[in-house]
Image (cartoon, rainbow, N blue to C red):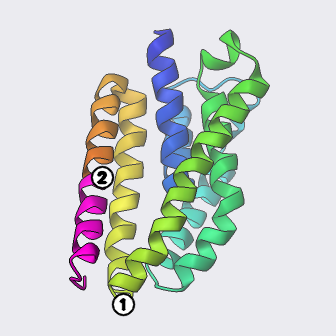
Amino acid sequence: MALANIVSAFGLAGAAGLNAYIPLLIVAVLGRAQVIHLTEPFDVLTSWWVIGALVILLIVEVVIDKAPGADHINDAIQTFVRPTAGAILFAANAGIVRDASPALALVVGLLLAFGVHAAKATARPVVNATTFGLGAPAISVVEDATSAIASLLAVYAPALLVVFVALVIFAGYKVYSRIKRNRAAGVVQ
């Protein structure tokens, strides 16, 4: 159970690096439905006003992140939001806080979400430049879907989350290798 909690915490924090509001909303709704148990002070996520605010913020994020140019401004703002969400989600995972320092849990979640966010924010300008902005909506949908799938797997099937993350990393590596190979050959994407 402790290992599953750790995998869940890592999965939720990593998913927050892609989209802060998807894993926060999933955890808030599942907490509200009493599918998962959130301890104090994280149980505040289950209040209707927090859930409502998360829905509004998610809608804004989803719309803005699809627009080339606006997505860069959004990523700059989210540099502070996503790591914070990752820290909260990592620390909120029941079992983690009891077995380790809450400060350590917050720092690990913050660093993990920031790392994922930094990779996303670094890759997005390349995607926009190589596709003349046409790739922004598509890659944003992939990021949102990845965040949602990772969040749900983190809660319901942590072992499958490990497989999912490995597949995402492998797919990312293959895409990166292809782009690098095409650039070296002088092929324009």
Residue neighbourhood size for the residue with mark 2, other residues' Cα within 10 Å, grouped as few (<14), some (14–19), many (≥20): few
- Closest to the camera, between mark 1 and mark 2, is 2
Q: Amino acid at mark 2?
A: Tyr
Residue 150 pos. (x, y %): 38, 41
User: How far apart, in angstroms, are the residues tagged by discs 1 and 2?
Assistant: 22 Å
Q: Which residues are magenta?
A: 172-189
Residue 16 seen in render: yes
Circle 1 sits in a helix, a strand or a loop, which is it?
loop
Residue receiving disc 2: 173
- Count the numbered circles shown: 2
Residue drawn at (52%, 50%) of the image: 116
Residue drawn at (56%, 56%) of the image: 117
Residue receiving disc 1: 132
Q: Nearer the viewer, residue 110 or 187?
A: 187
Label pair 1/2, CB-CB below 8 angstroms: no
Q: Is residue 42 left or right of residue 118?
A: right
